C-alpha cells in the first residue's frame, strides 16, 4: 500500500508528450502510463535555448496529476553538453565506435556542469519518499549530484543505449568518474545482458568492485543493483495504429506504387549506428547475386535527419545519397527505381501503414540498445500477410526476437542472403515466425518494462547484511 503512494519523478533530456499517442514513442508511452497512475513529476530540458540557460524560470504544465517541469539551456550548454559530450564522446563510444569518438576537456566540463545545475534545480522539488528515475547517457552524473544536494531517497537510472566493454570504455578520459557516479544510483538498468555484464566487468576490473550475487555489485561502500530491463512498445496501441484509416491510406499508396513488386523497408534515424551504408550495399549485393529480383523488388529507406549539426551525420547523409544514386544508376530501368530514401518524418499511424505494406523490414544496426522499429514492425503485421523481419545480431531486440532472420550487419553477403530468403519465404514459415515474435512483443511491452523497473527500485533494500559487513 505504502509503495503505491510513492510519487514518481522522471528525469530525461526531453519531456513528454504525456497524452498525444500519435506522437509519443515507446519511452513516452511507458512513462506516461506510470506517471499518470502514481501522479508525478517529469523534469528535463524545455527544448529552448535562452541566455539564462539552466537558470531560466521553470516552466510547468500540469495534466492528469502529472507536472511536466522544464528549464532552458544556453548555447554553450547545448554545444558542450548535448552536441559535444553526449553525442560526440558518449554516443559513438558506447556504440563501440572509438574511431568516431572525440574527447575534449571543455565539453567534459560543460557536461558535468549541466548535470550539476539540473540536479540543483531538481533537488528542491523532491520529497524523501519519491522514486526518482533518471534516463539515459545525458545524465550519468545527475544521481551523484542529487546526493550531493542531500537527496537520500531512491534513485534509479536506465541506459537506453548499449554499454560497451571496458576495453573500449576506458578510452574515455572520464570513464572512472562516470561509472563511480553511476554507483550513486540504487538501481542501474540496461537493455540487455551484454550491456549489464560490460558494466559489471568495468566495476570489477577497473574499480576493484565485486559481484555479490546475480544482480548486486559492490564497489567500496556502495552497492547497486545492476539489472536488465528490455524496453518494449505499447503493442496493443501500435496494432490499433496499424488498422487506422491513416495507416490504411499509406499502406494502399505504397502497395499501389509497388504493384507486383515486393516492398522492402527500413526505418531509422539517420545515424551511423544504424548500419545504413552496409544495408544499402547488402541490397546492391542482392541485385548482383540474385538477378531474378531486378525489377521485382523495391527498397524504401525512411531516414529522418538527426543531429545534422555534427560532421559525422552530414558525412553519412552524403554517403547514403551517393550510394543510393549509384545503385539506382547501375540497376534502374525506365519503369523501376530500385531504392528510394526519404528524410522526412511520418506520423506514427502513417509509419504503421508503411510497415504493413512491406514484405520485408531491414533492421540492421551495427549496434543498438534495443531498436523499437523491429518491435513496431512485428506489431503492425496481420495474420493474412505477415512480413519478414531481418534483424541484426547486434540489436538489443535480437534477444527477444530470435525468430527474425538474424544477420551480421557488417556482412554484405549475409544481408543479401537473408533478403533473398525473406523474399522467397513460404507463407507458412512467415506466419510461424511472426506468431512467435508477436507473442514476444505483446509480452514485453513498454508498460511491463516500466513496471519491472519501478518494482525493482521500490523493493531495493539500501541496507543489506553484505553492505553492513563492508
Ligand atoms: P533510437 O536510436 O531513436 O532510440 P529506436 O528504438 O528504433 O531508435 O526508436 C526510433 C523511434 O523513432 C521508433 O519509435 C520509430 O517509429 C520512430 N521513427 C523512426 N523514423 C521515423 C519517421 N520518419 N517518422 C516518425 N517516427 C519515426 C534509442 C536507442 C534504441 C532504443 C530506444 C528506446 O538508440 O536502441 O530502443 O532509444 O530505448
Image (cartoon, rainbow, N blue to C red):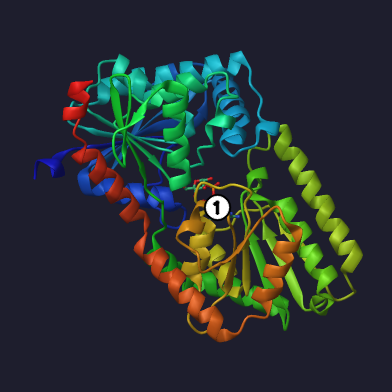
The residue beneath circle 1 is 395
SS label for mark 1: loop
The answer to whether any part of residue 64 appears in the image is no
* Mark 1 C-beta to ligand 1 under 8 Å: yes
Residue farthest to the left? 1
230 and 308: which one is in front? 230
**Residue 93 at x, y percent in the picture:** 60, 33
Task: Relative to 28, say whether 430 is above or below.
Answer: below
**Residue 191 at x, y percent in the picture:** 44, 46
Task: Relative to 454, say whether 153 is above or below.
Answer: above
Residue at left 34%, top 51%? 449
The answer to whether any part of residue 16 appears in the image is yes
- 186 left or right of 14? left
Residue at left 41%, top 38%? 15
276 and 335: which one is in front? 276
Task: Relative to 42, say whether 246 is above or below.
Answer: below
**Picture quarter containing residue 455?**
top left
Residue at left 19%, top 22%? 469
**Picture quarter containing residue 148?**
top left
Amino acid at each position: 500500500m505504502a509503495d503505491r503512494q510513492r510519487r514518481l519523478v522522471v528525469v530525461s533530456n526531453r519531456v513528454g508528450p504525456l497524452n498525444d499517442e500519435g506522437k509519443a514513442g515507446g519511452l513516452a508511452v511507458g512513462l506516461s502510463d506510470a506517471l499518470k497512475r502514481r501522479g508525478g513529476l517529469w523534469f528535463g530540458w524545455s527544448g529552448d535555448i535562452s541566455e539564462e540557460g539552466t537558470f531560466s524560470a521553470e516552466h510547468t504544465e500540469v495534466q492528469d496529476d502529472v507536472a511536466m517541469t522544464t528549464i532552458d539551456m544556453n548555447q554553450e550548454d547545448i554545444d558542450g553538453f548535448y552536441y559535444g559530450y553526449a553525442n560526440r564522446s558518449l554516443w559513438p563510444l558506447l556504440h563501440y565506435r572509438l574511431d568516431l569518438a572525440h574527447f575534449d576537456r571543455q565539453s567534459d566540463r560543460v557536461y558535468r556542469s549541466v548535470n550539476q545545475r539540473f540536479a540543483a534545480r531538481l533537488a528542491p522539488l523532491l520529497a524523501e519518499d519519491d522514486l526518482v528515475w533518471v534516463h539515459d547517457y545525458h545524465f550519468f552524473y545527475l544521481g551523484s549530484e542529487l546526493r550531493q544536494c542531500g537527496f537520500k531517497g531512491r534513485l534509479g537510472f536506465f541506459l537506453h543505449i548499449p554499454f560497451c566493454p571496458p576495453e573500449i570504455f576506458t578510452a574515455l578520459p572520464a570513464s572512472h568518474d562516470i561509472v563511480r557516479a553511476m554507483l550513486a544510483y540504487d538501481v542501474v538498468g540496461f537493455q540487455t545482458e551484454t550491456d549489464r555484464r560490460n558494466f559489471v566487468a568495468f566495476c570489477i576490473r577497473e574499480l576493484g568492485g565485486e559481484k555479490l550475487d546475480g544482480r548486486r555489485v559492490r564497489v567500496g561502500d556502495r552497492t547497486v543493483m545492476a539489472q536488465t530491463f528490455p524496453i518494449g512498445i505499447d503493442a496493443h496501441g501500435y496494432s490499433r495504429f496499424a488498422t487506422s484509416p491513416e495507416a490504411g491510406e499509406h499502406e494502399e499508396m505504397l502497395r499501389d506504387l509497388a504493384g507486383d513488386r515486393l516492398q522492402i523497408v527500413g526505418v531509422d534515424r539517420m545515424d551511423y549506428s544504424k548500419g545504413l551504408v552496409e544495408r544499402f550495399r547488402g541490397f546492391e549485393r542482392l541485385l548482383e547475386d540474385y538477378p531474378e529480383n531486378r525489377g521485382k523488388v523495391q527498397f524504401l529507406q525512411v531516414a529522418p535527419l538527426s543531429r545534422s549539426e555534427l560532421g559525422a551525420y552530414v558525412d553519412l547523409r552524403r554517403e547514403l545519397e551517393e550510394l543510393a544514386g549509384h545503385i539506382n544508376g547501375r540497376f534502374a530501368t525506365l519503369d523501376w527505381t530500385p531504392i528510394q530514401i526519404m528524410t522526412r518524418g511520418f506520423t506514427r499511424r502513417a509509419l504503421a501503414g508503411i510497415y504493413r505494406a512491406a514484405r520485408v523490414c531491414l533492421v540492421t544496426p551495427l549496434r543498438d540498445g534495443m531498436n523499437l522499429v523491429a518491435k513496431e514492425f512485428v506489431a503492425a503485421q496481420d495474420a493474412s500477410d505477415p512480413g519478414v523481419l531481418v534483424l541484426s545480431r547486434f540489436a538489443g531486440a535480437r534477444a527477444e526476437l530470435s525468430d527474425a532472420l538474424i544477420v551480421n550487419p557488417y556482412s554484405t553477403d549475409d544481408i543479401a542472403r537473408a533478403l533473398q530468403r525473406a523474399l522467397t519465404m513460404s507463407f507458412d514459415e512467415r506466419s510461424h515466425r511472426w506468431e512467435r515474435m508477436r507473442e514476444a512483443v505483446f509480452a514485453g511491452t513498454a508498460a511491463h518494462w516500466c513496471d519491472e523497473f519501478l518494482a525493482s527500485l521500490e523493493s531495493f533494500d539500501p541496507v543489506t547484511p553484505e553492505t553492513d559487513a563492508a
